[in-house]
Image (cartoon, rainbow, N blue to C red):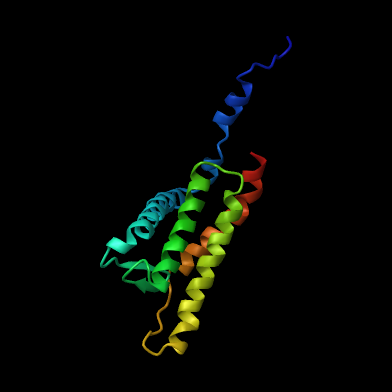
Amino acid sequence: MEERSTPFAEFDNNLLTRRRSLLPTWIKVFLWIFLIGGALAAIFLIAGSMMTHVSLSLYGMDANHPYSMTGLLICVLFLFKGIVAYGLWFEQDWAPQAAIADAIIGIAVCLVMMAIIPFVYPTISFTLRLELIPLYFYLKKMQNIKKSWENL
C-alpha cells in the first residue's frame, strides 16, 4: 500500500516537533519575565516624560528615570531581551543567534560593572554579579540547541 501525502501532512509533522520543546523550563520562565520586562521598558520609554521616579535595575546598573543615560541603556537592554524572548517563544529562525548575542552582551555588561566601573567611579563599590551564573548556562544551552533549532 502506497503512502500518500495529504495537504495537512506538513502541519502534522510540526505538531510533533516544536522548537520550543528544545528549551528547558528555566529558560521558558525567564522568557515570560523578559517578555513582560520588554513591554514595560517600551512603556517607560514612551511615557518617561510623565514619570517622576521609576526604579530601573539590570546587571548592576541602577537608574531612577528612563531618560537618564543609565536608564536608557537599561531600557534598551530590556527591549532587546524582550525581542529575544519573543523570538524564542514564537520559534523564530533568528532566535538562537539573538539569544547567544543576548547572553554575550549580558556577560560583558556584568563583567564591566564588576571589574571596571568600581575602579573608575569610587562611589560605586565592587559587587560580585551572580547573574553571570545563569547567563553562562543560558549561553551554553543556546549554543547547544542552535543547530537542532535550525534543522526543525
Residue 25 coordinates in the image, percent (x, y): 44, 48
* Relative height, residue 102 to residue 24 (above, below): below
Residue 120 seen:
yes
* Relative height, residue 121 to residue 102 (above, below): below
Residue 124 coordinates in the image, percent (x, y): 38, 84
Q: Residue furthest left?
A: 52
Q: Quadrant of the C terminus?
A: top right
Residue for point 55% across, 44% down: 22
**Along the line of sight, which residue is nearer the eye, 25 or 76?**
76
Q: Residue furthest front?
A: 49
Residue 141 seen:
no
Residue 116 coordinates in the image, percent (x, y): 50, 83
**Along the line of sight, which residue is nearer the eye, 80 or 138?**
80
Instruction: Give left or right: position of 49 versus 80.
Output: left
Which image quadrant is residue 61 in? Answer: bottom left
Which image quadrant is residue 122 in? Answer: bottom left
Residue for point 35% across, 59% down: 44
